[in-house]
Amino acid sequence: MTERPTNDDVWLVIPVYNEGEVIRDVLVDASKTFPNIVCVDDGSSDDSVAQIRSAAADVARTQTGSIHLVRHPVNLGQGAAIQTGVEYARARRDAQYFVTFDADGQHRVDDVVAMIDRLRTEPVDIIVGTRFADGRSESVPLLRRIVLRTVVFLSPRTRRLGLSDAHNGLRAFNKTVADQLDLLMAGMSHASEFVALIDHHHWRVAEQPVTILYTDYSRAKGQSLINGVNIVADGLLHGRMRR
């Protein structure tokens, strides 16, 4: 029987902003499967940093992995935090695969395992999670579903690339993508920029059906429809600037 990879060549990049209530449990759980994690604290004002350090100490003590902490002195936005985390991870000697993973407990480790398995075996550079496959969209809150569908409808590039949920924060990609990644949009509009970079660099892209865990905690952090439209508008403007 072939043994499963140890995932020593995988790095989880977790942007963190005021997630002290849940981040410790997220890290301890993820480290059981993915031993290399970098958290980028994006100027949190709560106890997120203390919780990250506590999780790192526990993980080090049990020898299940290594949790690294990088800090922004002020809040710069999720896009900036992801870029910082990827730059940190891609400098590690054995890093070959990278995952953007949310700090609020919405993402499942099992979905990441499936995405990494595909990166190892299929001719693809980046895999984006989608909530709109296998009937999974029914679990997405109605307003969120409207926002996400509107974003795709207003983005011809997203549709052309065959993406149905481009603003899904769960992404896995190889070193080719990591080395070329240069996010300039610091806030939530980085998701549109990811799509523009996929198109610009001709990265081979695929989607992976994933399950997002909508808890009371995560639901309280949802986006409005107008914010979704603004994200697309920013992304279209940025796409023109890149060209």
Image (cartoon, helix red, strand yellow):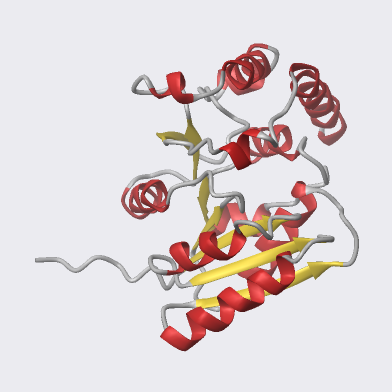
Name the residue located 56 percent from the left edge and 22 percent from the top edge: 141
Q: In which quarter of the image is the N terminus?
A: bottom left
In x, y percent, where is residue 35?
45, 72
The front one of 28 and 170 is 28
Name the residue located 83 percent from the left edge and 46 percent from the top edge: 186
Name the residue located 84 percent from the left edge and 27 percent from the top edge: 234
Q: How many labels does the image show?
A: 0
- Can residue 92 be spotted in the picture? no
In x, y percent, where is residue 218?
61, 40
25 shown above or below 167: below
In x, y percent, where is residue 146?
62, 14
202 shown above or below 72: above
In the displayed structure image, the side of residue 58 where residue 4 appears, left or right = left
Q: Residue pushed farthest left? A: 1
Name the residue located 51 percent from the left edge and 81 percent from the top edge: 58
The front one of 79 and 224 is 224
92 shown above or below 110: below
Q: In which quarter of the image is the C terminus?
A: top right
- Can residue 176 be spotted in the picture? yes
Toward which corner of the image does residue 40 lie, by quadrant?
bottom right
